Image (tube, rainbow, N blue to C red):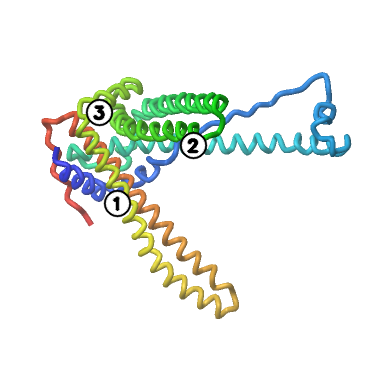
Amino acid sequence: MDYGQLISTAWRMTWRYRGLWVVGLFAGSASGSGGTFFNSGGGGTTGAESFGDAAPGLSDDQLSEVLAQVSQAVPVLIAVGVILLVIYLIFWLLSVACQSAVIAGGGEAATGADVTLGGAWSNGMKAFGRLAGLDLLWLVVWLVTISAVVAYAVSALGRTGLNASFLFGLFSVIALLGIIASVLSVVIAYAQRAIVLDGRGPIEGLASGFSLARTHLGTSVILWLIGLALSIGGGIALIIGLIVAAIPGLIVGGVLALIVNASGGPGVVPLIAAIGVTVLVAALVGGAALNTLLWHFWTLSYLRLTHPTAPLPPPPILSS
């Protein structure tokens, strides 16, 4: 595999099809997480009678007032929780949709076809449900794993107490999970593309990802290292770009600050606002480009491994 050509083609695809930056920006957003709210009723005694012994410093009237305030706050807390849950679900669904679109768009671009944002979105939505299933499957795996680690920690803590041996064992397990997660991230990258590009189901795609990583273990490790290097290098470049982007904001904000100061207003407000806006815009654009590059890199890697006899298409011509 020509890794240099892989990176070059991924970058040229990223720059040529800048419309995909929109989905690339949100493709890496965090998945939603749910919560459960419990509402249980008591019987036989009042709240004041139940908690009277637990709060000897409060009179019955004071305790009743506290319980009344808590009761009034419960609907508000439930409403806030439901709103947060809905927001999490929306961002998770948006993330899955954008992942499908950026993979589908990258797969089309790798064949030399002209790619549009609408076309990538339409093709990606065909795999939306299956890709969401993979996310849910992955979530279940992590929930089971975390539950096992918590059970181990509680059991070990009960046997040995909080000592150096317990902490060493806990840190070792966490470090091992980190290594396993890094390895499985490659499997998930392959599985996502097997689902979107080859029409696999969630379980079939995950099995395909494991098989591909096992068959090309050495190459997969190199690809993971390159992807890590691109991520770190791109992050450093992004930070430098944000610093540079702050300069015009500082100039414009400085001019506005002088004008506002001359009129007797707080000049620091337009200064901070101008710098904040320029840095925010630069962060969104730079982050979208970097994220899209990484998604294209793994899409090209998957295609190169699954179709070893088919050479990568010539890099798209950069357009201004």
Q: Residue at x 14, y 31 (%)?
A: 308
The residues bearing labels 1 and 2 have C-alpha atoms spaced at a distance of 31 Å
Q: What SS does tag 1 mark?
A: helix
* Up-down relation of residue 45 to residue 104 (above or below): above
The residues bearing labels 3 and 2 have C-alpha atoms spaced at a distance of 32 Å
Give x and y (percent) for residue 90: 49, 36
Q: What SS does tag 3 mark?
A: helix
Which of labels 1 and 2 is toward the front?
A: 1
Q: Is residue 122 visible?
A: no
* Up-down relation of residue 126 to residue 62 (above or below): above
**Quadrant (top left, top right, bottom left, bottom right) of the N terminus:** top left
Identify the residue under disc 1.
Answer: 233
Tally of numbered tags? 3
Q: Residue at x 31, y 39 (%)?
A: 102
| Kind of residue sitting beneath label 1 | Gly
Give x and y (percent) for residue 82: 60, 34
Could you say which quadrant of the image residue 252 lies in?
bottom left
Q: What SS does tag 2 mark?
A: helix
Could you say which quadrant of the image residue 283 lies in?
bottom left
Nearer to the camera, 1 or 82: 1
Mark 3 crowd level (few <14, some 14–19, many ≥20, 10 Å Cα) = many
Of pointers 1 and 2, the one earlier in the residue sequence: 2
Q: Is residue 228 left or right of residue 55?
A: left
Of pointers 3 and 1, the one earlier in the residue sequence: 3
Mark number, residue 213: 3
Say if mark 3 contacts mark 1, CB within 8 Å. Answer: no
